Image (tube, rainbow, N blue to C red):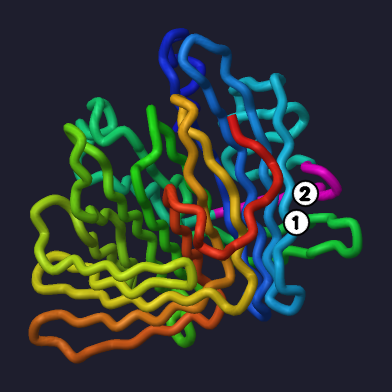
Amino acid sequence: MTAVFPTTPQQAGMYESFYLRAVSPDEPVSVWIRYTVHKRRGQAPRGSVWCTVFDAARGRPFQHKLTSDELHAPADGWVAVGDSRIAPGLAEGACGEARWSLRFASDEPELRYLPREWMYRAPLPRTKLTSPAPAACFDGTLELPDRTLELNGWPGMVGHNWGSEHAERWIWMHGIGFDDAPGTWLDVALGRVRVAGRLTPWIANGVLSLDGRRERLGGFGVRGLRVHETAAGAELSLPGRSGLLVQARVSIPGPTAAGWRYANPDGSEHDVINCSIAQLRLTVRRRGDEQRVFESPHGAVYELGMHERDHGVPVAPFSDG
């Protein structure tokens, strides 16, 4: 896997993001770190580092963002913004008063969300996404002004997305740390996009890893997808193959969500709500099998991207673009 921005034509606009999330196995504390590229049409790309720390005991998350013209794709890594970098197996950096040095490992192969490889080369969809480590284990430290977090075997994931514009509306959900099912994880992205001026229905793509086997969810032409989303959580019915149906209920505990503003290359913006200590309950049914229930008390991510700004979550005072 390599960064896309170095090969983007000068006149094209694009964005790109490498990101990680890691959650404590013992308490509702999580870190979400992003290394991003934003390029307006006809301009040079700029890089940003974003750091968010969620802690249910403290309420509102720690949030900071640093933007720099010092951006490159190192030979031994994915992207570097100033002195901050992310590469296979490591993430290092600083953002405001936060500093981190993390290592991660994963036995899982890459997750390609889109069901066909040609979709990663085609103009549509305008957002491409993949996860080089959909279920990873993190070790290291993250220093904050008033404390240091020691990550010792924290579960999480590493992701990568890029494109010419964000979806009109999207949901990203990642779940790990399920009670009595340590090898189970969920990673699914849903989006609505504008095509010829019309907003498409929700389209889902992702995977439920269960009993050591990946079950693909969603895709074009799959019936039974249901979405009810709010700024506080969502209820989803995610159909799979061979009669599989996953019902997911995710909720944000109290005032723990982070609000960010994301910019498109054309200058338009989305408000984005993310909570990486969300509660997740999965009900898994397959035709002919007994129903199974999985619960993760604080190991889920719920992210909602939208244009409206009346969601009630304070947005961090850091511009994008």
Residue position for label 1: 140
Magenta stretch contains residue 104: yes
Q: Amino acid at mark 2?
A: Trp
Q: Please say if 128 is above or below 199.
A: above
Q: Residue 59 appears at what percent x and percent y?
A: 71, 73
Q: Relative to residue 318, is residue 16 depicted above or below?
A: above
Q: Residue at x 64, y 59 (%)?
A: 314
Looking at this rendering, what residue extends furthest in the right direction?
Answer: 146
Residue wearing tag 2:
100
For the residues bearing labels 2 and 1, Cβ distance under 8 angstroms: yes
The reply to whether residue 2 is in sight is no
Secondary element at image label 1: strand
Mark 2, Cα crowd under 10 Å, few <14 / some 14-19 / many 20+, is: some
Q: For the residues marked 2 and 1, what is the alpha-carbon distance in whole angstroms? A: 8 Å
What's the mark number on residue 175? none
Of helix, strand and loop, which one carries label 2?
strand
Residue 249 left/right relative to 120: right
Task: Tell me the chief SS of the magenta region.
Answer: strand
Snapshot quadrant of residue 295: bottom left
* Residue 256 spot, x, y in % from top left: 64, 70
Residue 167 location, x and y as percent?
A: 35, 42
Q: Quadrant of residue 87?
A: top right
In percent of the image, x 36 and y 50: which residue is there? 169
Q: Is residue 203 above or below residue 246?
A: above
Range covered by the magenta-colored residues: 95-105
Q: Nearer the viewer, mark 2 or mark 1?
A: 2
Q: Farthest bottom residue?
A: 290
Count of numbered circles in the view: 2
Question: Viewed as shown, does residue 45 lie left or right of 14?
Answer: right
